Image (tube, grey):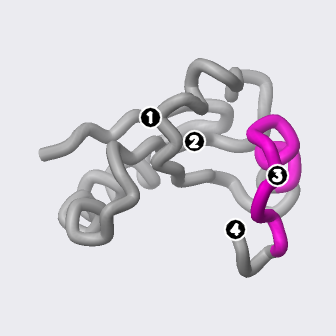
Amino acid sequence: MQDLGWSGITNGSLLELAEEQFDVLITSDQNLKYQQNPSGRRLSIVQLPTNQVPIVASLAPDVEMALGTIRTGEFIQIRSP
């Protein structure tokens, strides 16, 4: 997000910006599901349990599977192993 100059942008605005450029947003924000409704959006969301690199790396197969099956506007939550 920082590379795109999006730091500090709030969830609603962030989703609007993201759906202009991406099909899926992968996040570790645990509150996003309760703050934003992805249905009706062009953007799908995959939520990770953490942003800790070793854990995220271990979840790569789950993320790959989610990316292969996710549909527009869908929210998929990936849990810790």
The answer to whether residue 35 is above or below residue 80 is: above
Q: Mark 1: which amino acid?
A: Ile
Q: Label 1: which residue?
A: 76
Q: Label 3: which residue?
A: 9
Q: Is residue 4 magenta?
A: no
- Neighbour tally class for label 3: few under 14, some 14-19, many 20 plus, Cα within 10 Å: few
Res 39 quadrant in image:
top right
- First reached walking from the N terminus: tag 2 or tag 4: 4
- Position of residue 53 in the picture relative to residue 19 (left or right): left
Q: Label 2: which residue?
A: 45
Are the residues tagged 3 and 2 within 8 Å (C-beta)?
no
In the image shown, does 17 or 35 lie closer to the viewer? 35
- Neighbour tally class for label 2: few under 14, some 14-19, many 20 plus, Cα within 10 Å: many
* Residue displayed at 79% across by 43% down: 10
Circle 4 SS class:
loop
The magenta span reads 5-17
Q: Mark 4: which amino acid?
A: Met
Circle 3 SS class:
loop
Q: Label 4: which residue?
A: 1
Q: Mark 2: which amino acid?
A: Ile
* Residue displayed at 81% across by 64% down: 6
Q: Nearer the viewer, mark 3 or mark 2?
A: 3
CA separation in Å, label 3 and label 2: 17 Å
Residue sticking out furthest to the front: 8
